[in-house]
Image (cartoon, rainbow, N blue to C red):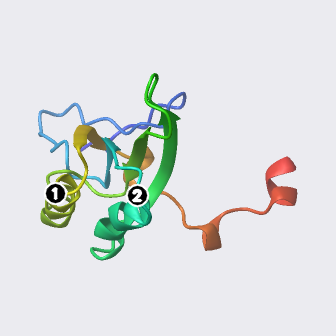
Amino acid sequence: MRPARTDRIAGRTSCPTDGTSCSPFAAKSLTTVVFTLPNLPGSLFRALSVFALRDIDVTKIESRPIPGRPWEYLFYLDLAAGAHELRASRALTHLAEFAPSSKTLGSYPSVLGAAPRSQAGAPSLETAAQ
């Protein structure tokens, strides 16, 4: 049996070509979500806590102003969990309870099927520059 090959350009792992199937969720998944919050003290804290309480790592967070609505923002999050996972599904349901608008943009396998590295395992700036 031939092992799965890895594309050198994008670092993606593809399924073996021997006819065996591979699940799209077999590897670690990432999920991208977008939502809005009311301009109230602690609203971002409450939004992020739904993931922290379920041990879901937020690997990326961005905010973009909403045109024509001062002090209101769209938040984009990447989560180290697939939307198909029970803990992620419950977190997203909990988020929808107080976010006026929320949408899951999609779940996809992370690069090489591994979850993103934590800060403790990340290379130092000197190592990265070499």
Residue 97: mark: 1
Mark 2: few/some/many CA within 10 Å (<14, 14-19, 20+): few
Which residue bears the numbered disc 2? 40
**Residues under labels 1 and 2: Cα distance?**
15 Å
Instruction: Give the x, y percent position of residue 6.
Output: 43, 37
Kindly identify the residue that appears in the image at 24 percent across and 52 percent down.
82
Looking at the image, which is closer to me, 70 or 51?
70
Q: Position of residue 22 (x, y in %)?
A: 16, 42
For the question of whether residue 50 can be seen, the reply is: yes
Where is residue 127? Give x, y as percent.
82, 58
Picture layout, residue 115 above or below residue 49? above
**Relative side of 119 to 12, left or right:** right
Q: Amino acid at mark 2?
A: Leu
Q: Percent x, y for residue 46?
A: 35, 67
Horizontal side of 65 relative to 55 (left or right) equals right
Residue at screen point 36% across, 72% down: 52
User: Closer to the camera, 86 or 124?
Assistant: 86
Q: Nearer the viewer, mark 1 or mark 2?
A: 2
Question: In the rendered image, which quarter is residue 107 located in?
Answer: top left
Query: Based on the displayed image, in which of its 4 quarters is residue 102 positioned?
Result: top left
Identify the secondary structure beneath mark 2. loop
> Quick check: 112 left or right of 20?
right
Task: Tell me which label, 1 or 2, sits earlier in the chain.
Answer: 2
